[in-house]
Amino acid sequence: MKRAEQIAKGTEITITRIFDAPRELVWKAWTVPEVFMRWWGPKGFTAPVIRMDLREGGRYLWCMRSPEGEDYWSTGMYREIVPPERIVATDSFADEKGNIVPASQYGMSGDWPMELLMTVTFEEPDGGTRLTVRSAGLPPGEPTEQAEAGWNESLDKLAEVLEQGEVAMETQFTAEPGTHAVVIKRVFDAPHEDVFRATTDSKLIPLWWGPKSLTTMVEAMDLRRGGIWRFVQRDAEGNEYAFFGVYHEVAPPERLIYTFEFEGMPGHVMLETVTFGDLGEKTKVTDRAVFQTIEDRDEALATGMEEGAVESMDRLADLLEKKK
């Protein structure tokens, strides 16, 4: 993430940030209350109440709580919602019931208007997201500077949430532009020791590895550097599909590096690096698979790699939930 542009002109501020995250994920951070409350507000503030009626004509009610325990409420009406490209809404100070109140109730300048206009746009440059926030109608001088500082600190917090992979529990699947790689990310609601164990225990792997429509058998799993692994899947008609590789690194509970090859297409080998990020009671898994050629990668994508990976991650999440 980097700050790309920041302009203050009269009664409007424009702040642009570029995040290393898919646009759909940044959109979700703005539109799902449980995620929005993780980053909304300046540094040190929390957001105990976030309500959103996300439709044109719908209203929102947000509460920021200062480190001293003071609550600051804001409300507005959504004027335009274009997923995942743009949000336009009014923005006013409010009380806890959503009634619009003057800024002076919170000690702000009497010149502060009863209503601002907030426009948020989401663009996709080079696989990331360019987020632009415009707030129009601000009084000049110190109020504008305060609003600018507050937005910047909130967006700093948003960057941290995105970088930690805490925005969504769903699997993120990305074919890296201009490379031979595919990256799969998922945050699991389990400690990283448990997630590592589930991905390296030969008794547990058949419970989640691959689509539900196939049965997986672990024929070999020598979990050490230079060790061989081999999994065989069988469909309802009895057809078998075998996969194998060699472990290059086994560093529990943080990292696995191994080769991956489908026996039905010999010679097409990819190198897979799986890291297990410790987020306390959660774990961020990042699986980066590097193919020998872009053509190999595109062939894998065309034959359902994304669908299979997402289903496997969903099944792993279900298994970890049952193991709690």
Image (cartoon, grey):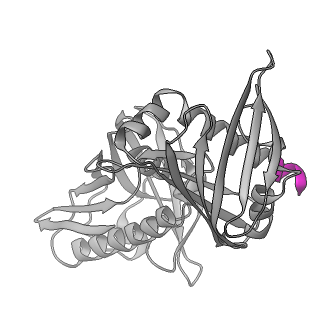
Q: Is residue 99 left or right of residue 194?
A: left
User: How many labels, in total?
Assistant: 0
Q: Residue at x 40, y 31 (%)?
A: 56
- On the rendered image, what quadrant is the C terminus found in? bottom right
Name above or below for residue 286 compared with residue 51: below
Question: Secondary structure of the magenta portion, mostly?
Answer: helix
Tell which of 63 and 314 is nearer to you: 314
Task: Place residue 146 in its image quadrant.
Answer: bottom left
Residue 115 shows in this picture? no
Q: Residue at x 46, y 35 (%)?
A: 58
Q: Is residue 231 left or right of residue 114?
A: right
Task: Place residue 212 in its image quadrant.
Answer: top right
Q: Residue 59, how many percent across, how many down?
A: 47, 41
Farthest-out residue, left? 9
Q: Residue at x 33, y 47 (%)?
A: 90
Tell whether position 294 is magenta.
no
Span highlighted in magenta in the image: 319-324
Name above or below for residue 27 compared with residue 71: above
Q: Residue 314, how many percent across, how many down?
A: 70, 42
Farthest-out residue, bottom? 68
Name above or below for residue 281 compared with residue 126: below
Tell which of 276 and 21 is nearer to you: 276
Tell which of 294 and 195 is nearer to you: 294
Q: Is residue 208 left or right of residue 115?
A: right
Q: Residue 172, how many percent across, how many down?
A: 52, 47
Q: Residue 264, how many percent across, how many down?
A: 60, 31
